[in-house]
Amino acid sequence: MSRGSAAPKPGKPGVRAGRAAGQGRDSSRVGRLFQGGRLLQDGAPGGPVLRLFARWVRRPLLPAMRLWRRNIQLRVVASTLLMSLGVVLLLGFVVIGQVRNGLLDAKEKAAQSQAAGGFSAAQDRASAPGGPTGQDGAGRNGSSVNWRSDLVQQLASGGQSAFNVVALSLESEGTASRGARASGEVDPTASIPSGLRDSVAQGTGTYQTFTRIKYTSGKASEPGLVLGKRLNDASGTQYELYYLFPLTQEEDSLALVKGTLATAGLFVVVLLGAIAWLVVRQIVTPVRMAAGIAERLSAGRLQERMKVTGEDDIARLGEAFNKMAQNLQLKIQQLEELSRMQRRFVSDVSHELRTPLTTVRMAADVIHEARVDFDPVTARSAELLGDQLDRFESLLADLLEISRFDAGAAALEAEAIDLREVVRRVIGGAEPLAERKGTRIRVVGDAQPVVAEADARRVERVLRNLVVNAVEHGEGRDVVVRLASAGGAVAVAVRDYGVGLKPGEATRVFNRFWRADPARARTTGGTGLGLSIAVEDARLHGGWLQAWGEPGGGSQFRLTLPRTADEPLRGSPIPLEPEDSRRNRERAAAEERGPGGRGSLPGQSLAERSALGVPPRAPMPPQAAADPTALPGSGARVVRQPAAGTDRTVEREDRTLGR
């Protein structure tokens, strides 16, 4: 293979040139991958498993994320639903809290009033004459317990299941269990909290607390409010009297309020979402319609218009959009008509000039054949007349070719060809001019076939133009034609060592009738349209034609074609900036002078090193910022994108020079 076929592709910054000889052979590759929001290493334990898990989790979410990014109506409705849900929850908490506090306050007031009446009645009964009396302690205790039982039954009978009454002996007397009396099958020891009993035993007022009321009959416990007070019975013995008010009704009322609020809140959230969907739809639908019409307008359907209804802001937007589309259509039609007229004029003039040109050519040939009989001045005039007629015919042919490109009538007759044969024909045709200039044309990289599907006539025209220009501007130095193929692309580069190109000229060299030096004579009769036609031929193949140059260091033109027709190019097998450019030579010299560098022999050139068998230094790929074809005003686009299956970047270039 040729040397150019192994050169790094554009967009791969120093992947091969800067790599040491032994690096990457037997060392394990540790690639850092960003998966699932974490930086994982191939060598880390569990790294592949975590990456697979992250991909498995992320894969079903991708359609939803894509829909979320692209659908503004969905985002607005979802945001409205979330905010509405938050507002409803906040209001629900506030309302439920207020209702609960209201119910408990009302229950506490009613319970306190009821318990106060009961405590007063118990005290009045203990103070009434005829209470139970006795002489010994046993008799007093038994009479007191019976009296408390009667008191509990009497006080509980007025509650009608609204409350229960419990009477307990003071714990200090050691008769708490024997003296406990309760109504409604209430478990007195389990229903009365010990903290409340301590407060009642130590104080003289009424104390209350919330607890759960438990029953001895197996009935489920229920929340309740307990109020207690220490009293004296008829015999003067202290005891504890408690009122237990179940909160079942309040709990049911609060549950009803919660259910009502939840149902109403859900209904409100759904209703707000539907309202937001309808409102946003009125705004989004015209925008989507405008976007669709704009896409159709960009596709060439200039007659598309928006449907305008009403007189609101959306209607005014639609009217303005339609006016803009109408004006654009008129301007484009005018420009197309003007372009058609120009192309027709160029084509008609070129065709019409052929008839008088043929007549003049016949007369000029007769005069040229008889120039030996003329005096020297007339003979020289006959020779100049023939040369200018040749140039005139070439100019007419180029104008006709340009008009076909402008009209889109140029057709590609692609077939599998070997570019080596095309290069040989081109060099054979340029040999006479090269001999007159004292230039030698060398071919590099023709050891193996360089096959591509292309139009042989157009490729030969492009290469002939490049080679002739290189010979003419090469100042008698060698011209190197390099061939290479790699991947899905083939390339031919023509390198000269003449005057070169000034900064910025590589972006204008493909313009029609542009000349680097206006004062420079065209000794070969060029028309100034050759490179413009060449770049159009390259574009017709789906390829690139690019230029590089430096003042006094020569220039290089690179033609890159896809190996297969209609295959998109991702790179070129030949770097645009040659390896013997001034910048690359300075960089190579700096590397050789660095620590551990191995310098070449003094005064040893690149050609001499190659002749001695010393492999040339791999060229450093040019930086994107220094690429002359990517400078402002070139009409070129250089887009970096990852190649399939790798994490490296290659250049994807869409050349639009020469238009």
Image: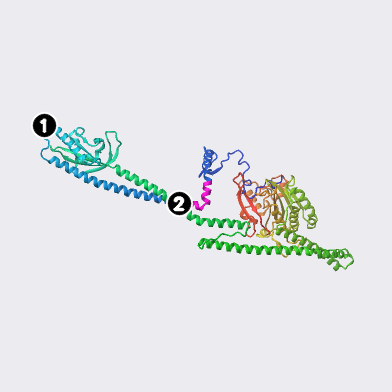
Residue 291 coordinates in the image, percent (x, y)? 56, 56
Q: Is residue 358 above or below residue 266?
A: below
- Residue 253 is marked as none
Give the magenta part as a residue range.
Answer: 63-76
Q: Is residue 157 above or below residue 398?
A: above
Would residue 419 appear left or right of 105 to someone viewing this image? right
The amino acid type of the residue labelled 2 equals Gly
Would residue 158 appear left or right of 444 to someone viewing this image? left
Q: Secondary structure at mark 2?
A: helix
Judge by depth and name the residue closer to the eye, 393 or 436.
393
The amino acid type of the residue labelled 1 equals Asp
Residue at image location 27% in from the left, 48% down from the top: 106
| Magenta-colored segment: predominant secondary structure | helix
Residue 110 coordinates in the image, percent (x, y)? 24, 46
Q: Is residue 72 magenta?
A: yes
Q: Would residue 638 be visible to someone looking at this image?
A: yes
Q: CA distance from mark 1 to mark 2?
A: 81 Å
- Residue 273 is marked as 2
* Sequence-wise first label, 1 or 2: 1
Q: Is residue 532 magenta?
A: no
Judge by depth and name the residue closer to the eye, 404 or 514.
404
Q: Residue furthest right?
A: 373
Would residue 426 appear left or right of 140 to someone viewing this image? right
Q: Would residue 498 be visible to someone looking at this image?
A: no
Residue 333 coordinates in the image, percent (x, y)? 65, 63
Residue 260 coordinates in the image, percent (x, y)? 37, 47
Q: Is residue 519 above or below residue 292?
A: below
- Residue 136 is marked as 1
